[in-house]
Image (tube, rainbow, N blue to C red):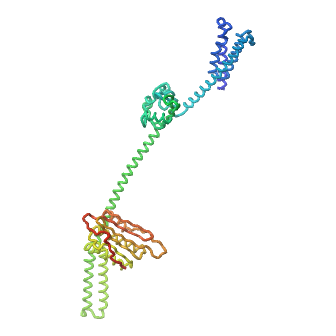
Amino acid sequence: MRSLKSNVARYTLALLATAIALLLRWSLTPLFGDTNPYHTLWAAIVFTSWYCGLGPSIISVILGATGVAFFFLSPYYSLAVQDPADRFGFVGFLLLSGVIVALGEVNRRAQSVRFHQARLLDLANDAIIELDVRDDTIQYWNEGAEKLYGWSKADALGKPIHTLLKTVFPLSVIETKAMLMRQGNWQGELIHTKHDGARIYVTSRWTLQENRRRTSGTWLEINRDITERKKAEQELQNAYAELENRVAERTDELRQTNQLLRLLSVQLLRSQDEERRRIARELHDGVGQYLAGIAMTLEGLRTDPNVFPVSLAHKLQEATKATNSCISEVRTMSHLLHPPLLEELGLASAVQWYVEGFAARSGIKTDIHMPEDLGRIGNEIEIVLFRVLQESLTNIYRHSGSKAAIIEIGADSQQVWLQVQDEGKTNGHASPEPFRPGVGITGMRERVKDLGGVLEIASGQMGSRVKATIPLAPRSQVAAPDRNVSVGRHS
């Protein structure tokens, strides 16, 4: 219905324009006479061709030509045109009118396309702006730009865009336009200021409209508001930074807690050593002495026939033997808790004594390789290395199933190391179980670390290996590792 009304209006307008043009020519007859019958019609033809459309303009031409032939060409009031000159003029009118109608249709369609494009651009949510390349003045400003920035078309057209919007570029405006001229397009993020003074972030795309003349023409700018996205990114970045700070704080707290626990663990192990030393001394000096006194008393009674009859002598002999065995066990227990050789003669003697006893008790063959003149390397280091040796050999005896073990001790001017290696299971049917350090080895790791050293544990097809390496103080004098010799094998 709306289209029908529009068509009726266009045809009506064309008819009115033609009728007015004919009436005007009729009124000018006293002035022009029979000459120039088409003068007033040209305006009607041009008007209808440009504004009324193809159909109305054709009707206007036909109606105009008919009116001229009927009213102004001889014979009058007849459609027959007899004069050759009038016929020639009539045909010329029709031809020229046809050209005008064709040009008008082309122009009307071009305007319709431009109007349709402009309407589509206005319907777009993005801000679409056309600018002059020479001075950056605004040539087109769509409704999306009005909504985004708050300036109307009347306010914006003809204004330099970067002055109006106070554009902040990631690079300078000169560099940005140079990229546009060189590449024909540019894309990036800008900061603009709205009519109310609010600053917004936009993602902008620029496209050069005429590339053949880079010094003139227009370029199209398409802007999209990304302020909320930038705010969300900033909030996310702030949250991430806050999370990192909290993680760093918790990590620092955990590190301090672990450091405290490690120090407490080391202190506990040192206290354990002190307690072992105390118990060892009490066993040796207290219980051992009492047992020795009992053994002496029993021996005296056994050799004095006046006290016990001869028939009970064998009982006293058994009691004396049991007491001596108890003394030996107490002495061994005391030495295992804290070998006196460790304090009196150093690590080398204590290791030699302990390994001999271990081989005798366990039946595991052991080889020791260490320098002949290892010397003293400090009480704390010697105690730690001795405890590592004890724990390692105990694990071999309990878990490894190996029939042999190799102990290596070495030192140079900067560090000392102890390594204990077993041969794994030797039955040929099962691979050795992975080495699982117990509480003792874990504690030794902390003690080694407390002295600045490293405890390495490795397990594989060839057996398990425990190696402790501890740095020496500058004043310590130790032998070079190439002076290591084989001390012997124990079984």
Whether residue 49 is visible: yes
Q: Is residue 449 above or below residue 397?
A: above
Left or right of 276: which side holds 192?
right
From the top left corner, tell me how far across and down residue 116 is, in percent. Answer: 59, 29
From the top left corner, tell me how far across and down residue 149 is, in percent. Answer: 47, 31
In the figure, residue 399 lies in which quadrant?
bottom left
From the top left corner, tell me how far across and down residue 305 is, in percent. Answer: 25, 93
In the figure, residue 192 lies in which quadrant?
top left
Residue at the image point whose x is 48% and y is 75% from the top = 428
Left or right of 235: which side holds 55?
right
Pick the front one: 193 or 300? 193
In the figure, residue 19 lies in which quadrant?
top right
Pick the front one: 210 or 5? 210
Q: In which quarter of the image is the C terminus?
A: bottom left
Q: How many numbered marks does the figure carry?
A: 0
Q: In this view, does 197 lie above or below 289?
A: above
Whether residue 224 is visible: no
Q: In this view, does 490 lie above or below 20?
A: below
Q: Quadrant of the N terminus?
A: top right
Q: In this view, does 165 lie above or below 260?
A: above
From the top left corner, tell me how far across and down residue 193 is, in percent. Answer: 43, 32
